[in-house]
Image (cartoon, grey):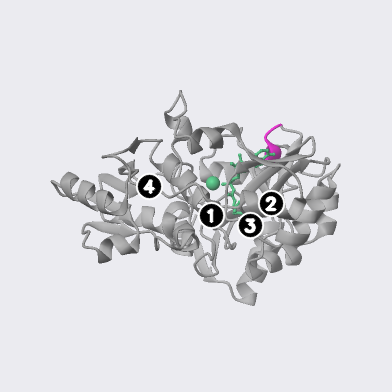
């Protein structure tokens, strides 16, 4: 199969809507990351997503909608807090896991009685959903295990020959996948942190918001007991090691380690200004939003440079930084070194 790459003009969006109605898979821009979209009500179409992505069948997909009507046709027992959050954060980078009705292809929810639903804000994604009139199942458009794509070129690199069309809607504004939450006994549980933060959720829903136990483990720097392939996500080809250190310690530690070709730093732009070389920046130290936006393309850049070993900054646990930290911890398979006494 030849994969076409088209700039997201009205004609191209129309073409994509036709393909989706015919049960095909299309690479589409969203404000978070690019998605691999198909008609969520068509089992064959959804299966094509799993095949193209190489995704384990037991990992459920997020369904993308363009209206509250669509939400009410797909989900049931929607708690009042979900409406409050939709009001505040939709369209935008928040996915809510809710009990589903029977209208979706069973693989979408991988046998669970719930479905993750999100209303994206990207104009191309929205007009596509509206034009084909279908809820679109769409995981991130990377091959399973590699960093999520934040440009159409990233999608082409992973999906060439596997899907008929990729729509180019420019670089993704957010750059990290949506915050995923579910509701339990009046509380909200964050299953995957994103740029919609724990605090923002608590303020908007006026209820208790907890991070899933694994997140608590990450926050306390306790690596899971059974590491391995299960946790290898967002990973470049290189081995990634996170360095928990002050600014000056990070720079001097990385310089000491850079004894041969292929050893890179994944750092803040300020570290490069301070003299670090063989380094790729993932944004500014003082701008977690820029780090979210740039992290995945920085990881892909390290592959292009042929990096074999990467020492990366460990962002803090506050606000948006927690989401960046979560992706980096997984890319590093939870390897963290602390070179010296950390100066707080
Ligand atoms: O920003 C995003 O969320 C992007 C764009 C394309 O919308 N999509 C995305 O999809 O990141 P994916 O498939 O790469 O990640 C979906 C996450 C997975 O961790 C999956 O396990 C979780 O959401 N998920 C989906 N449905 C779920 C459910 N019913 N219960 C629990 N977790 C669910
Ligand atoms: Mg993904």
Q: CA distance from mark 4 to mark 1?
A: 20 Å
x, y (%) of residue 42?
73, 46
Q: Which badge, 1 or 2, comes first in the chain's sequence?
A: 2
**Residue placed under numbered mark 1 in the picture:** 320
Residue 136 in view of the camera: no
Is label 3 within 8 A of ligand 1 (CB to nearest ligand atom)?
yes
Q: Which mark is residue 344?
A: 4
Q: Which mark is residue 93?
A: 3
Give the magenta-colored segment's residue range: 107-111
Q: CA distance from mark 1 to mark 2?
A: 12 Å
Q: Which mark is residue 264?
A: none
Mark 4 or mark 3: which is in front? 4
Q: CA distance from mark 4 to mark 2?
A: 28 Å
Element type at mark 2: helix
Element type at mark 3: loop
Q: Where on the picture, by quarter, is residue 164?
A: bottom right
Q: Which badge, 4 or 1, comes first in the chain's sequence?
A: 1
Is label 4 within 8 A of ligand 1 (CB to nearest ligand atom)?
no
x, y (%) of residue 142?
49, 50
Q: Residue at x 38, y 59 (%)?
A: 282
Please state which of residues 181 and 270 is positioned toward the viewer in this rendering. 270
Q: Residue at x 26, y 66 (%)?
A: 273
Task: Please say whether residue 108 is one of the residues in the magenta stretch.
Answer: yes
**Residue placed under numbered mark 2 in the picture:** 201
Q: Which badge, 3 or 1, comes first in the chain's sequence?
A: 3
Badge 3, how many Cα within 10 Å: few under 14, some, many 20+?
many
Badge 1, how many Cα within 10 Å: few under 14, some, many 20+?
many
**Left or right, residue 50 beside residue 130:** left
Q: Which badge, 4 or 3, comes first in the chain's sequence?
A: 3
Please state which of residues 142 and 201 is positioned toward the viewer in this rendering. 201
Q: Which badge, 3 or 2, comes first in the chain's sequence?
A: 3
**Left or right, residue 329 beside residue 262:** right
């Amino acid at each position: 199969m030849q994969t076409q790459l088209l700039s997201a003009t009205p004609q191209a969006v129309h073409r994509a809507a036709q393909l989706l109605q015919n049960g095909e898979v299309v690479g589409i821009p969203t404000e978070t990351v690019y998605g691999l979209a198909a008609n969520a009500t068509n089992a064959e179409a959804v299966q094509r997503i799993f095949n193209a992505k190489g995704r384990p069948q037991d990992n459920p997909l997020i369904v993308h909608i363009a209206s509250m009507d669509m939400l009410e046709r797909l989900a049931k027992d929607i708690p009042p807090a979900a409406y409050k959050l939709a009001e505040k954060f939709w369209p935008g980078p928040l996915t809510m896991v809710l009990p589903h009705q029977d209208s979706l292809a069973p693989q979408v929810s991988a046998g669970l009685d719930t479905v993750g639903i999100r209303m994206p804000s990207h104009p191309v994604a929205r007009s596509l959903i509206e034009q084909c009139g279908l809820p679109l199942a769409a995981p991130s458009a990377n091959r399973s295990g590699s960093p999520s794509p934040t440009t159409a070129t990233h999608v082409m690199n992973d999906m060439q020959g596997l899907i008929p069309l990729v729509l180019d809607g420019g670089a993704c504004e957010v750059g990290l996948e949506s915050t995923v939450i579910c509701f339990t006994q009046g509380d909200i549980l964050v299953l995957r942190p994103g740029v919609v933060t724990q605090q923002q959720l608590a303020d908007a829903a006026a209820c208790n918001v907890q991070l899933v136990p694994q997140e608590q483990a990450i926050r306390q720097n306790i690596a899971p007991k059974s590491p391995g392939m299960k946790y290898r996500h967002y990973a470049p080809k290189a081995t990634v090691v996170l360095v928990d250190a002050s600014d000056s310690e990070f720079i001097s530690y990385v310089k000491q380690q850079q004894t041969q070709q292929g050893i890179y730093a994944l750092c803040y732009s300020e570290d490069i200004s301070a003299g670090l070389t063989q380094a790729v920046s993932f944004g500014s130290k003082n701008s977690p939003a820029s780090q979210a936006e740039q992290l995945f393309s920085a990881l892909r850049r390290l592959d292009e440079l042929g990096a074999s070993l990467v020492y990366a900054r460990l962002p803090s646990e506050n606000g948006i930084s927690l989401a960046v930290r979560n992706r980096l911890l997984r890319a590093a398979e939870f390897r963290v070194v602390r070179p010296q006494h950390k100066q707080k």
